[in-house]
Image: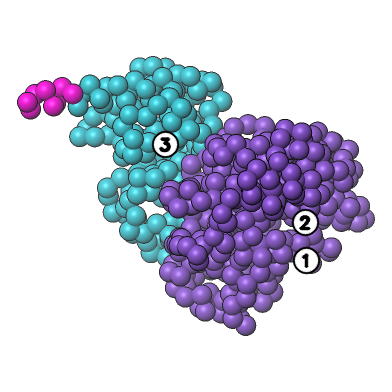
Chain colours: A purple, B cyan
Amino acid sequence: MRAFEYVSPTTKEQAVALLSSTWGETEILAGGTDLLALLKDDIVRPRRVVNIKEIAELRGISFSMPAGLRIGATVTLQELLDHPDIARHYPALVQAARGVTSPQIRNMGTVGGDLCQRPRCWYFRSGFGLLARDETGRSLVLEGDNRYHAILGNEGPAYFVNPSSLAPALIAYGARLRIFGPRGTREIPVERFFRIPKSEAEREYDLQPNEIVTEILVPPPSAGMVSATYEVRQREALDWPLATASVALVLEGQRVRSARVVLGHVAPIPWPSPEAERALLGKTVSEEVAQAAANAAVQRARSLGKNEYKIQLARVAVRRAIQQAVGGGARR
Amino acid sequence: MDVRLLTLNVNGEQHTLAVPVCKTLLEVLREDLHLTGTKHGCELGECGACTVLVDGEPILSCLALPIELEGREILTIEGLMEGGRPHPLQIAFAEMGAVQCGYCTPGVVLSAKALLDRNPMPTRQEIAEALSGNLCRCTGYIQILDAVERAVAWVRERRLILEEGRS
Protein backbone atom coordinates (compact mmCIF):
# COMPACT_ATOMS: atom_id res chain seq x y z
CA MET A 1 0.00 0.00 0.00
CA ARG A 2 1.05 3.57 -0.65
CA ALA A 3 1.51 5.78 2.39
CA PHE A 4 -1.42 7.87 3.60
CA GLU A 5 -2.29 10.03 6.57
CA TYR A 6 -4.67 8.37 9.03
CA VAL A 7 -7.21 10.37 11.03
CA SER A 8 -9.89 9.17 13.41
CA PRO A 9 -12.47 11.84 14.21
CA THR A 10 -15.03 11.34 16.96
CA THR A 11 -17.85 13.47 15.51
CA LYS A 12 -19.45 13.47 12.08
CA GLU A 13 -18.77 17.21 11.78
CA GLN A 14 -15.04 16.59 12.24
CA ALA A 15 -15.18 13.71 9.75
CA VAL A 16 -16.79 15.84 7.06
CA ALA A 17 -14.26 18.64 7.65
CA LEU A 18 -11.44 16.13 7.15
CA LEU A 19 -12.87 14.84 3.87
CA SER A 20 -11.90 16.52 0.61
CA SER A 21 -14.60 17.86 -1.70
CA THR A 22 -12.73 16.20 -4.61
CA TRP A 23 -12.97 12.46 -5.29
CA GLY A 24 -9.73 10.58 -4.88
CA GLU A 25 -8.02 12.80 -2.32
CA THR A 26 -9.52 11.19 0.77
CA GLU A 27 -11.23 7.89 1.51
CA ILE A 28 -13.62 6.82 4.28
CA LEU A 29 -12.58 3.78 6.33
CA ALA A 30 -15.14 1.68 8.19
CA GLY A 31 -14.68 -2.11 8.18
CA GLY A 32 -11.89 -1.80 5.64
CA THR A 33 -12.68 -5.06 3.85
CA ASP A 34 -13.18 -3.24 0.56
CA LEU A 35 -11.03 -0.13 1.08
CA LEU A 36 -7.86 -2.02 1.99
CA ALA A 37 -8.26 -4.24 -1.07
CA LEU A 38 -8.71 -1.13 -3.27
CA LEU A 39 -5.63 0.47 -1.69
CA LYS A 40 -3.53 -2.65 -2.27
CA ASP A 41 -4.69 -2.92 -5.87
CA ASP A 42 -3.78 0.77 -6.31
CA ILE A 43 -7.32 1.56 -7.50
CA VAL A 44 -7.57 4.41 -4.99
CA ARG A 45 -4.62 6.57 -3.92
CA PRO A 46 -5.85 8.85 -1.14
CA ARG A 47 -3.53 11.20 0.71
CA ARG A 48 -5.72 10.80 3.80
CA VAL A 49 -7.88 7.98 5.18
CA VAL A 50 -10.68 9.01 7.55
CA ASN A 51 -11.71 6.31 10.02
CA ILE A 52 -15.38 6.75 11.01
CA LYS A 53 -15.60 3.90 13.55
CA GLU A 54 -14.87 6.20 16.51
CA ILE A 55 -17.96 8.31 15.83
CA ALA A 56 -20.40 7.14 18.51
CA GLU A 57 -23.60 8.19 16.76
CA LEU A 58 -22.78 6.01 13.73
CA ARG A 59 -23.03 2.91 15.91
CA GLY A 60 -25.85 0.86 17.33
CA ILE A 61 -29.15 -0.71 16.33
CA SER A 62 -32.52 0.28 17.73
CA PHE A 63 -35.96 -1.11 17.03
CA SER A 64 -39.33 -0.01 18.34
CA MET A 65 -42.91 0.17 17.15
CA PRO A 66 -44.06 2.27 15.44
CA ALA A 67 -40.68 3.92 14.77
CA GLY A 68 -39.15 0.92 13.04
CA LEU A 69 -35.51 0.02 12.73
CA ARG A 70 -32.46 2.26 12.85
CA ILE A 71 -29.07 0.81 11.97
CA GLY A 72 -25.91 2.87 12.45
CA ALA A 73 -23.67 2.86 9.39
CA THR A 74 -20.73 1.28 11.23
CA VAL A 75 -22.75 -1.63 12.66
CA THR A 76 -21.04 -4.83 11.52
CA LEU A 77 -22.87 -7.49 9.55
CA GLN A 78 -22.43 -9.85 12.50
CA GLU A 79 -24.00 -7.35 14.91
CA LEU A 80 -26.93 -7.09 12.51
CA LEU A 81 -27.24 -10.89 12.42
CA ASP A 82 -27.10 -11.14 16.22
CA HIS A 83 -29.94 -8.67 16.78
CA PRO A 84 -33.11 -10.51 17.85
CA ASP A 85 -35.57 -7.84 16.57
CA ILE A 86 -34.03 -7.87 13.10
CA ALA A 87 -34.15 -11.65 13.02
CA ARG A 88 -37.84 -11.56 14.00
CA HIS A 89 -39.12 -8.72 11.82
CA TYR A 90 -36.80 -8.49 8.81
CA PRO A 91 -35.95 -12.01 7.59
CA ALA A 92 -34.99 -10.82 4.09
CA LEU A 93 -32.32 -8.58 5.62
CA VAL A 94 -30.97 -11.35 7.84
CA GLN A 95 -30.86 -13.80 4.95
CA ALA A 96 -29.02 -11.21 2.84
CA ALA A 97 -26.46 -10.52 5.60
CA ARG A 98 -25.93 -14.24 6.12
CA GLY A 99 -25.09 -14.42 2.42
CA VAL A 100 -21.96 -12.37 3.04
CA THR A 101 -19.91 -15.47 3.39
CA SER A 102 -17.02 -15.69 5.73
CA PRO A 103 -17.39 -15.08 9.45
CA GLN A 104 -14.26 -12.92 9.28
CA ILE A 105 -15.82 -10.54 6.73
CA ARG A 106 -19.06 -10.41 8.76
CA ASN A 107 -17.05 -9.50 11.87
CA MET A 108 -15.28 -6.66 10.06
CA GLY A 109 -17.61 -5.43 7.30
CA THR A 110 -20.20 -2.78 8.09
CA VAL A 111 -23.73 -2.08 6.89
CA GLY A 112 -22.71 1.31 5.48
CA GLY A 113 -19.72 -0.29 3.82
CA ASP A 114 -21.89 -2.95 2.21
CA LEU A 115 -23.86 -0.14 0.53
CA CYS A 116 -20.82 1.96 -0.44
CA GLN A 117 -18.39 -0.79 -1.53
CA ARG A 118 -17.12 -0.48 -5.09
CA PRO A 119 -18.05 -2.93 -7.85
CA ARG A 120 -16.25 -6.26 -8.08
CA CYS A 121 -15.94 -5.99 -11.90
CA TRP A 122 -12.52 -7.40 -12.72
CA TYR A 123 -11.78 -4.65 -15.22
CA PHE A 124 -12.50 -2.01 -12.57
CA ARG A 125 -10.34 -3.89 -10.05
CA SER A 126 -7.55 -4.07 -12.63
CA GLY A 127 -7.48 -0.29 -13.02
CA PHE A 128 -9.56 0.21 -16.17
CA GLY A 129 -12.13 2.42 -14.42
CA LEU A 130 -15.78 2.03 -13.60
CA LEU A 131 -16.76 1.94 -17.27
CA ALA A 132 -13.87 -0.37 -18.20
CA ARG A 133 -12.85 1.25 -21.47
CA ASP A 134 -9.61 0.91 -23.36
CA GLU A 135 -7.66 3.92 -24.61
CA THR A 136 -9.80 4.12 -27.74
CA GLY A 137 -12.97 4.27 -25.65
CA ARG A 138 -14.20 0.77 -26.46
CA SER A 139 -15.75 -1.26 -23.66
CA LEU A 140 -13.51 -4.04 -22.43
CA VAL A 141 -16.59 -5.72 -20.97
CA LEU A 142 -18.43 -6.04 -24.29
CA GLU A 143 -15.36 -7.39 -26.07
CA GLY A 144 -14.04 -9.38 -23.15
CA ASP A 145 -15.07 -11.74 -20.39
CA ASN A 146 -18.47 -10.58 -19.19
CA ARG A 147 -19.66 -13.78 -17.55
CA TYR A 148 -20.36 -11.99 -14.25
CA HIS A 149 -21.61 -8.71 -15.69
CA ALA A 150 -25.04 -7.12 -15.94
CA ILE A 151 -28.06 -8.68 -17.63
CA LEU A 152 -30.39 -5.78 -16.81
CA GLY A 153 -29.79 -2.06 -17.11
CA ASN A 154 -26.92 -2.97 -19.40
CA GLU A 155 -27.54 -0.58 -22.28
CA GLY A 156 -24.22 1.01 -21.35
CA PRO A 157 -21.89 2.63 -20.77
CA ALA A 158 -21.76 0.77 -17.39
CA TYR A 159 -21.90 -3.01 -17.30
CA PHE A 160 -20.70 -3.88 -13.77
CA VAL A 161 -23.14 -5.27 -11.22
CA ASN A 162 -23.90 -3.57 -7.93
CA PRO A 163 -22.14 -5.63 -5.26
CA SER A 164 -24.29 -4.79 -2.23
CA SER A 165 -25.80 -7.76 -0.43
CA LEU A 166 -28.13 -5.73 1.76
CA ALA A 167 -29.43 -3.12 -0.68
CA PRO A 168 -32.08 -5.27 -2.42
CA ALA A 169 -33.60 -6.27 0.94
CA LEU A 170 -33.43 -2.70 2.27
CA ILE A 171 -35.15 -1.40 -0.87
CA ALA A 172 -37.83 -4.10 -0.61
CA TYR A 173 -38.55 -2.87 2.92
CA GLY A 174 -38.65 0.77 1.77
CA ALA A 175 -35.57 1.79 3.78
CA ARG A 176 -34.05 5.27 3.71
CA LEU A 177 -30.49 6.48 4.16
CA ARG A 178 -29.43 9.40 6.31
CA ILE A 179 -26.42 11.18 4.87
CA PHE A 180 -24.37 13.90 6.54
CA GLY A 181 -22.29 16.46 4.67
CA PRO A 182 -21.10 20.07 4.76
CA ARG A 183 -24.67 21.29 4.32
CA GLY A 184 -26.06 19.13 7.11
CA THR A 185 -28.24 16.03 7.06
CA ARG A 186 -30.28 14.76 4.14
CA GLU A 187 -32.39 11.65 3.75
CA ILE A 188 -33.06 9.61 0.63
CA PRO A 189 -34.66 6.26 -0.14
CA VAL A 190 -32.02 3.53 -0.53
CA GLU A 191 -33.52 2.94 -3.98
CA ARG A 192 -32.51 6.45 -5.10
CA PHE A 193 -29.00 6.21 -3.61
CA PHE A 194 -27.74 4.04 -6.46
CA ARG A 195 -27.41 5.17 -10.06
CA ILE A 196 -25.87 4.07 -13.30
CA PRO A 197 -22.85 6.28 -14.06
CA LYS A 198 -22.84 7.86 -17.50
CA SER A 199 -19.22 8.92 -17.44
CA GLU A 200 -15.99 7.96 -15.67
CA ALA A 201 -16.32 11.12 -13.56
CA GLU A 202 -19.58 9.90 -11.97
CA ARG A 203 -19.93 7.54 -9.07
CA GLU A 204 -22.34 4.62 -8.87
CA TYR A 205 -24.12 6.22 -5.91
CA ASP A 206 -25.50 9.58 -4.86
CA LEU A 207 -22.82 10.69 -2.43
CA GLN A 208 -20.48 13.66 -2.50
CA PRO A 209 -16.81 13.01 -1.67
CA ASN A 210 -17.26 14.79 1.66
CA GLU A 211 -20.54 13.16 2.66
CA ILE A 212 -20.93 10.10 4.86
CA VAL A 213 -23.77 7.64 5.21
CA THR A 214 -24.65 7.82 8.91
CA GLU A 215 -27.77 5.71 9.40
CA ILE A 216 -30.14 3.32 7.68
CA LEU A 217 -33.81 3.70 8.61
CA VAL A 218 -36.19 0.84 7.90
CA PRO A 219 -39.95 1.31 8.29
CA PRO A 220 -41.75 -0.92 10.80
CA PRO A 221 -43.05 -4.19 9.34
CA SER A 222 -46.65 -3.83 8.12
CA ALA A 223 -49.29 -6.24 9.33
CA GLY A 224 -49.36 -9.22 6.98
CA MET A 225 -45.87 -8.63 5.61
CA VAL A 226 -43.80 -11.63 4.54
CA SER A 227 -40.31 -11.31 3.10
CA ALA A 228 -37.29 -13.29 1.98
CA THR A 229 -33.98 -13.11 0.15
CA TYR A 230 -32.73 -15.87 -2.12
CA GLU A 231 -29.21 -16.00 -3.52
CA VAL A 232 -27.76 -18.10 -6.29
CA ARG A 233 -24.01 -18.57 -6.09
CA GLN A 234 -21.31 -20.87 -7.38
CA ARG A 235 -19.82 -21.79 -4.03
CA GLU A 236 -21.40 -21.79 -0.59
CA ALA A 237 -18.65 -19.72 0.99
CA LEU A 238 -16.04 -17.10 0.13
CA ASP A 239 -17.90 -16.17 -3.00
CA TRP A 240 -20.11 -13.49 -4.49
CA PRO A 241 -23.68 -14.18 -5.55
CA LEU A 242 -24.43 -14.54 -9.26
CA ALA A 243 -28.02 -13.36 -8.82
CA THR A 244 -30.18 -12.56 -5.83
CA ALA A 245 -33.73 -11.48 -5.18
CA SER A 246 -35.33 -9.89 -2.14
CA VAL A 247 -39.09 -9.71 -1.88
CA ALA A 248 -41.44 -8.10 0.62
CA LEU A 249 -45.14 -8.87 0.18
CA VAL A 250 -48.06 -7.61 2.21
CA LEU A 251 -50.79 -10.26 2.23
CA GLU A 252 -54.46 -9.69 2.90
CA GLY A 253 -55.80 -13.13 3.60
CA GLN A 254 -54.08 -15.09 0.85
CA ARG A 255 -53.96 -12.23 -1.64
CA VAL A 256 -51.00 -9.97 -2.34
CA ARG A 257 -51.99 -6.42 -1.45
CA SER A 258 -48.58 -4.89 -2.16
CA ALA A 259 -45.32 -6.28 -3.45
CA ARG A 260 -41.70 -5.24 -3.72
CA VAL A 261 -39.34 -7.39 -5.75
CA VAL A 262 -35.71 -6.28 -6.01
CA LEU A 263 -32.92 -8.15 -7.78
CA GLY A 264 -29.26 -7.95 -6.85
CA HIS A 265 -26.01 -8.64 -8.73
CA VAL A 266 -27.75 -8.43 -12.09
CA ALA A 267 -27.49 -4.70 -12.95
CA PRO A 268 -25.27 -1.69 -12.17
CA ILE A 269 -27.83 -0.80 -9.49
CA PRO A 270 -30.03 -2.97 -7.25
CA TRP A 271 -32.83 -3.68 -9.69
CA PRO A 272 -36.46 -3.22 -8.58
CA SER A 273 -38.85 -5.06 -10.84
CA PRO A 274 -42.23 -3.36 -11.23
CA GLU A 275 -43.06 -6.05 -13.83
CA ALA A 276 -42.72 -8.80 -11.22
CA GLU A 277 -44.62 -6.72 -8.69
CA ARG A 278 -47.53 -6.26 -11.10
CA ALA A 279 -47.61 -10.00 -11.74
CA LEU A 280 -48.14 -10.58 -8.02
CA LEU A 281 -50.66 -7.88 -7.12
CA GLY A 282 -54.11 -9.14 -6.21
CA LYS A 283 -53.08 -12.77 -6.72
CA THR A 284 -52.89 -15.69 -4.37
CA VAL A 285 -49.30 -16.87 -4.60
CA SER A 286 -49.06 -20.29 -6.19
CA GLU A 287 -46.13 -21.87 -7.98
CA GLU A 288 -47.57 -20.60 -11.30
CA VAL A 289 -47.96 -17.05 -9.99
CA ALA A 290 -44.40 -17.07 -8.60
CA GLN A 291 -43.14 -18.39 -11.92
CA ALA A 292 -45.04 -15.72 -13.85
CA ALA A 293 -43.55 -13.01 -11.63
CA ALA A 294 -40.07 -14.49 -12.11
CA ASN A 295 -40.54 -14.53 -15.88
CA ALA A 296 -41.72 -10.92 -15.78
CA ALA A 297 -38.66 -9.90 -13.75
CA VAL A 298 -36.26 -10.99 -16.50
CA GLN A 299 -38.45 -10.04 -19.46
CA ARG A 300 -36.13 -7.16 -20.38
CA ALA A 301 -32.89 -8.99 -19.53
CA ARG A 302 -30.30 -9.44 -22.27
CA SER A 303 -27.03 -11.29 -22.48
CA LEU A 304 -23.74 -9.48 -23.15
CA GLY A 305 -22.40 -12.63 -24.77
CA LYS A 306 -21.08 -14.75 -21.94
CA ASN A 307 -23.67 -14.16 -19.23
CA GLU A 308 -26.87 -15.54 -20.68
CA TYR A 309 -26.96 -18.18 -17.93
CA LYS A 310 -27.50 -15.40 -15.39
CA ILE A 311 -30.95 -14.69 -16.83
CA GLN A 312 -32.14 -18.12 -15.76
CA LEU A 313 -30.40 -17.79 -12.37
CA ALA A 314 -32.14 -14.45 -11.77
CA ARG A 315 -35.48 -16.01 -12.73
CA VAL A 316 -34.92 -18.82 -10.25
CA ALA A 317 -33.84 -16.40 -7.51
CA VAL A 318 -37.07 -14.38 -7.90
CA ARG A 319 -39.31 -17.44 -7.92
CA ARG A 320 -37.65 -19.00 -4.88
CA ALA A 321 -37.60 -15.74 -2.92
CA ILE A 322 -41.34 -15.36 -3.47
CA GLN A 323 -42.01 -18.96 -2.49
CA GLN A 324 -39.75 -18.69 0.55
CA ALA A 325 -41.52 -15.51 1.66
CA VAL A 326 -45.02 -16.97 1.50
CA GLY A 327 -43.80 -20.25 2.95
CA GLY A 328 -43.01 -18.14 6.01
CA GLY A 329 -39.65 -19.81 6.45
CA ALA A 330 -36.74 -17.69 7.57
CA ARG A 331 -34.30 -20.20 6.13
CA ARG A 332 -32.13 -19.59 3.12
CA MET B 1 5.07 9.03 5.99
CA ASP B 2 2.53 8.82 8.83
CA VAL B 3 4.28 6.65 11.46
CA ARG B 4 2.78 6.09 14.92
CA LEU B 5 4.08 4.62 18.12
CA LEU B 6 1.61 1.84 18.95
CA THR B 7 1.25 -0.56 21.84
CA LEU B 8 -0.29 -3.84 20.72
CA ASN B 9 -1.36 -6.69 22.97
CA VAL B 10 -0.36 -9.83 21.08
CA ASN B 11 -0.66 -13.23 22.74
CA GLY B 12 -0.85 -11.60 26.15
CA GLU B 13 2.33 -9.53 25.73
CA GLN B 14 2.51 -5.78 25.23
CA HIS B 15 4.62 -4.71 22.27
CA THR B 16 5.40 -1.06 21.65
CA LEU B 17 6.61 -0.33 18.16
CA ALA B 18 6.75 2.40 15.52
CA VAL B 19 4.38 1.48 12.69
CA PRO B 20 3.61 3.27 9.41
CA VAL B 21 -0.20 3.59 9.43
CA CYS B 22 -0.38 2.01 5.98
CA LYS B 23 1.12 -1.26 7.25
CA THR B 24 -1.40 -4.06 7.82
CA LEU B 25 -1.64 -6.12 11.00
CA LEU B 26 -0.45 -9.13 8.99
CA GLU B 27 2.72 -7.29 7.96
CA VAL B 28 3.41 -6.05 11.49
CA LEU B 29 2.90 -9.53 12.98
CA ARG B 30 5.20 -11.19 10.48
CA GLU B 31 7.81 -8.52 9.79
CA ASP B 32 8.08 -6.61 13.07
CA LEU B 33 7.09 -9.20 15.67
CA HIS B 34 8.44 -12.17 13.65
CA LEU B 35 5.26 -14.14 14.35
CA THR B 36 5.29 -15.91 11.01
CA GLY B 37 2.65 -18.47 11.96
CA THR B 38 0.04 -16.08 10.54
CA LYS B 39 0.11 -16.69 6.81
CA HIS B 40 0.10 -14.29 3.91
CA GLY B 41 -2.44 -15.59 1.38
CA CYS B 42 -4.60 -13.70 -1.09
CA GLU B 43 -4.24 -10.29 0.63
CA LEU B 44 -7.80 -9.44 -0.40
CA GLY B 45 -10.01 -11.20 2.14
CA GLU B 46 -10.84 -14.23 0.06
CA CYS B 47 -8.80 -17.03 1.65
CA GLY B 48 -8.66 -16.69 5.46
CA ALA B 49 -4.98 -17.73 5.73
CA CYS B 50 -4.20 -14.55 7.70
CA THR B 51 -6.99 -15.09 10.27
CA VAL B 52 -6.20 -13.98 13.83
CA LEU B 53 -8.53 -13.46 16.79
CA VAL B 54 -9.26 -9.96 18.09
CA ASP B 55 -11.06 -10.04 21.43
CA GLY B 56 -11.84 -13.68 20.66
CA GLU B 57 -13.43 -13.14 17.23
CA PRO B 58 -11.82 -14.11 13.91
CA ILE B 59 -10.78 -11.27 11.62
CA LEU B 60 -8.54 -10.97 8.58
CA SER B 61 -5.18 -9.47 9.56
CA CYS B 62 -4.43 -8.59 5.92
CA LEU B 63 -7.34 -6.11 5.93
CA ALA B 64 -6.82 -4.65 9.41
CA LEU B 65 -4.73 -1.66 10.41
CA PRO B 66 -2.80 -2.03 13.69
CA ILE B 67 -3.59 1.56 14.63
CA GLU B 68 -7.21 0.48 15.14
CA LEU B 69 -6.28 -2.40 17.44
CA GLU B 70 -4.56 -0.71 20.37
CA GLY B 71 -6.07 -1.97 23.61
CA ARG B 72 -7.57 -5.06 21.96
CA GLU B 73 -6.46 -8.63 22.61
CA ILE B 74 -4.82 -10.05 19.49
CA LEU B 75 -4.27 -13.81 19.45
CA THR B 76 -2.15 -15.55 16.82
CA ILE B 77 -1.42 -19.25 16.45
CA GLU B 78 1.79 -18.76 18.48
CA GLY B 79 -0.35 -17.80 21.50
CA LEU B 80 -2.55 -20.88 21.49
CA MET B 81 -0.50 -23.02 23.88
CA GLU B 82 -2.13 -23.31 27.28
CA GLY B 83 0.24 -23.70 30.25
CA GLY B 84 3.07 -24.80 27.97
CA ARG B 85 0.94 -27.52 26.38
CA PRO B 86 -0.54 -27.49 22.88
CA HIS B 87 -4.23 -26.65 22.64
CA PRO B 88 -6.46 -29.73 22.12
CA LEU B 89 -7.18 -28.43 18.60
CA GLN B 90 -3.46 -28.43 17.79
CA ILE B 91 -3.04 -32.02 19.04
CA ALA B 92 -6.14 -33.17 17.17
CA PHE B 93 -5.01 -31.54 13.91
CA ALA B 94 -1.61 -33.25 14.17
CA GLU B 95 -2.99 -36.65 15.11
CA MET B 96 -5.86 -36.72 12.62
CA GLY B 97 -3.78 -35.68 9.62
CA ALA B 98 -5.79 -32.50 9.24
CA VAL B 99 -2.68 -30.72 8.01
CA GLN B 100 -1.26 -31.25 4.56
CA CYS B 101 0.69 -28.31 3.17
CA GLY B 102 -0.13 -26.46 6.38
CA TYR B 103 -0.61 -23.01 4.91
CA CYS B 104 -4.26 -22.67 5.91
CA THR B 105 -3.83 -24.44 9.25
CA PRO B 106 -3.12 -21.51 11.62
CA GLY B 107 -6.19 -19.64 10.36
CA VAL B 108 -8.38 -22.74 10.46
CA VAL B 109 -7.32 -23.58 14.02
CA LEU B 110 -8.00 -20.03 15.21
CA SER B 111 -11.45 -19.95 13.59
CA ALA B 112 -12.16 -23.29 15.30
CA LYS B 113 -10.94 -21.94 18.65
CA ALA B 114 -13.26 -18.93 18.38
CA LEU B 115 -16.15 -21.33 17.75
CA LEU B 116 -15.31 -23.66 20.67
CA ASP B 117 -14.93 -20.75 23.09
CA ARG B 118 -18.43 -19.60 22.15
CA ASN B 119 -20.02 -23.01 21.66
CA PRO B 120 -18.18 -25.96 23.28
CA MET B 121 -20.56 -28.54 21.73
CA PRO B 122 -20.92 -27.54 18.07
CA THR B 123 -22.55 -29.77 15.48
CA ARG B 124 -20.60 -30.71 12.36
CA GLN B 125 -22.67 -28.19 10.41
CA GLU B 126 -21.82 -25.45 12.90
CA ILE B 127 -18.14 -26.34 12.61
CA ALA B 128 -18.33 -26.18 8.83
CA GLU B 129 -20.04 -22.77 8.99
CA ALA B 130 -17.47 -21.41 11.44
CA LEU B 131 -14.65 -22.55 9.15
CA SER B 132 -16.33 -21.35 5.96
CA GLY B 133 -14.00 -18.35 5.76
CA ASN B 134 -10.87 -20.49 5.60
CA LEU B 135 -9.90 -21.93 2.26
CA CYS B 136 -7.99 -25.24 2.21
CA ARG B 137 -6.75 -26.57 -1.12
CA CYS B 138 -5.28 -29.87 0.12
CA THR B 139 -7.40 -31.80 2.57
CA GLY B 140 -10.88 -31.57 1.13
CA TYR B 141 -11.92 -30.40 4.62
CA ILE B 142 -13.02 -33.82 5.88
CA GLN B 143 -9.98 -34.36 8.11
CA ILE B 144 -10.27 -30.79 9.35
CA LEU B 145 -13.87 -31.29 10.44
CA ASP B 146 -12.93 -34.65 11.99
CA ALA B 147 -10.09 -33.04 13.94
CA VAL B 148 -12.31 -30.30 15.35
CA GLU B 149 -14.86 -32.92 16.39
CA ARG B 150 -12.08 -34.92 18.06
CA ALA B 151 -10.93 -31.84 19.99
CA VAL B 152 -14.52 -31.17 21.06
CA ALA B 153 -14.80 -34.74 22.36
CA TRP B 154 -11.50 -34.52 24.27
CA VAL B 155 -12.42 -31.24 25.90
CA ARG B 156 -15.78 -32.71 26.94
CA GLU B 157 -14.17 -35.89 28.34
CA ARG B 158 -11.64 -33.85 30.26
CA ARG B 159 -14.40 -31.71 31.73
CA LEU B 160 -16.37 -34.84 32.75
CA ILE B 161 -13.29 -36.34 34.41
CA LEU B 162 -12.63 -33.12 36.29
CA GLU B 163 -16.26 -32.94 37.39
CA GLU B 164 -16.14 -36.57 38.57
CA GLY B 165 -12.97 -35.85 40.53
CA ARG B 166 -14.70 -33.01 42.31
CA SER B 167 -17.86 -34.89 43.22
Q: Secondary structure at mark 1?
A: loop
Residue closest to the eye, B2 or A331: A331
Residue at the front extreme?
Answer: A253
Q: Work out whether residue A162 or residue A65 is closer to the camera in this orientation and state it.
A: A65
Q: Residue furthest bottom?
A: A183
- Residues at discs 1 and 3 both on one chain: no
Residue A277, x across and y down, in percent: 76, 50
Q: Give the residue drawn at x 72%, y 64%.
A: A192
Q: Residues within 10 Å of mark 2 (few under 14, many from 20)?
A: many
The chain ID associated with circle 2 is A
Q: Is residue A123 visible?
A: no
Q: Are marks 1 and 2 in contact (CB under 8 Å)?
A: yes
Residue A74 horizontal/vertical position (percent):
50, 61
> In the figure, residue A212 lies in which quadrant?
bottom right
Q: Amino acid at mark 1?
A: Glu
Which residue is located at x 72 percent, y 32 percent?
A287
Up-down relation of residue A199 to residue A243 (above or below): below
Disc 2: which residue: A130
Q: Which residue is mark 1?
A: A202
Badge 2 and badge 3 both on one subunit: no
Q: Give the Cα separation between the discs numbered 2 and 3.
A: 35 Å
Element carrying mark 2 = loop
> Which residues fall within the magenta stretch?
B160-167
Asked whether residue A236 appears in the rendered view, the answer is yes
Where's residue B161, x and y in %? Answer: 15, 22
Q: Quadrant of residue A61?
A: bottom left
| In this picture, residue B150 sits left or right of residue A42 | left
Instruction: Read off the chain for label 1.
Output: A
Q: Which residue is mark 3?
A: B111
